[in-house]
Amino acid sequence: MTDKNVEAIVAGGSPVRAQDGVDEHLVERRIHSDSVYEGHFLKVRRDQVRLPDGGIAWREYVVHPGAVMVVPLTDDGQLIVERQHRYPLDRVLLEFPAGKLDPNETTLRCAQRELREETGYLAREWAYAGRMHNACAYSTEFIEVWFARGLVPGPQQLDEGEYVEVHAMTEDALFALAASGEMTDAKTLVGLLKLQQWRNGTWTPPWQSAD
Amino acid sequence: MTDKNVEAIVAGGSPVRAQDGVDEHLVERRIHSDSVYEGHFLKVRRDQVRLPDGGIAWREYVVHPGAVMVVPLTDDGQLIVERQHRYPLDRVLLEFPAGKLDPNETTLRCAQRELREETGYLAREWAYAGRMHNACAYSTEFIEVWFARGLVPGPQQLDEGEYVEVHAMTEDALFALAASGEMTDAKTLVGLLKLQQWRNGTWTPPWQSAD
């Protein structure tokens, strides 16, 4: 409950990153690390850590390669979204296109590949919209967000075992589904926050051409 | 690419839930399910599933009890946030208070308990702000969002091994950290979207007294 500290940290740099010598009262340090499950998709590690007070604890977490999400805007003011059955939830969610990074793939190349594979669209312009951490308590996953515009339609190229329905919806319709609580996918809701910040002038997409 | 379908579904009900007889082309059905890792915190299952085309696939996922997040508003227009080291990311994240549901606990009781334990605050009024799914590809986790106001300070009661720094920040400061990309916690960003929707009149918190 030291409000002065956060002001000092904000003034000195960032309140959202661990800072050497400043955050020792918060930081947990690895003692050793074991792989405890190695599946086809999920990899789980269990680490022994040193707590800030010197005590010992265990931390279990999923090792994830990272992912990208694309917020695709059509020339007539709609957004491209997908309906996909998410087996762990047994629900069909409405989501912006997204997918995992391949090894050695840049986040822009991954964004372009996922948009093309899942929706068929190519995009002439891209803008980086930041990173999110969607399961910080138990996963290394990060999701890099890209906005895409100047869309050109083409054929879907879904992975085997992937079933995705692609739709165009207006911004208003998507914001309404977020307000009503019907849209529940966290990454997609974060994409809408970014879109809202663009619309209200507090964030400007740094558009660049496709390559 | 059947935009008519989504319009029909929107007209008939919800585009965000699986509907019997409508979504058979998307839905994966369980054939059997095995526990493959049972840790202190993480539980992982691997299920064999029937794909929409009749093929077979495997799905691995974390079984999570669900969680709550609280967006706490002070009487002088600030928000209560936490800085916490997130070991899987080795970063200190700025987050709204949150925590896992205990067995048989309602989401409101959990929200009240987590707010009290992590920040010391009691709140006189609460408003339910919806549910999010933060790792739909590989976790059953859902996060129920509550807004809290009429805050009364008290002592923190952190769990053993939990290190959390509590701060009050203005809405503008938090929205600025979201716009700059410095705030990366997905659930917290979704809380800001909901706050933005309150401020712009597209969502109204259904306030209720604490009990």
Image: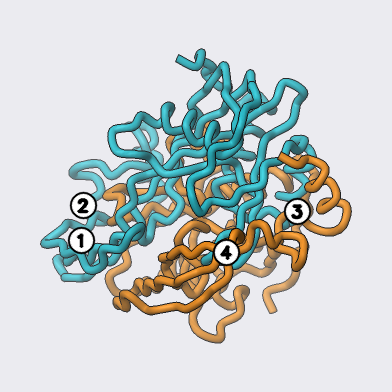
Chain colours: A orange, B cyan
- Badge 1 crowding class, 10 Å Cα cut-off, few under 14, some 14 to 19, many 20 or more, is some
| B69 displayed left or right of B182 | left
Observer-side mark, 1 or 4, equals: 4
Look at 54% across and 33% down and name the residue there: B115
The reply to whether label 1 and label 2 mark residues of one chain is yes
The amino acid marked with disc number 3 is Pro
Which residue is under mark 4?
A54
Is there CB contact under 8 Å for labels 1 and 2?
A: yes
The Cα atoms of the two marked residues, 1 and 2, are separated by 6 Å
Which residue is under mark 1?
B52
The Cα atoms of the two marked residues, 1 and 4, are separated by 52 Å
- Badge 2 crowding class, 10 Å Cα cut-off, few under 14, some 14 to 19, many 20 or more, is some
| B21 displayed left or right of B10 | left
Look at 66% across and 41% down and name the residue there: B81
The Cα atoms of the two marked residues, 3 and 4, are separated by 24 Å
Which residue is under mark 3?
A15
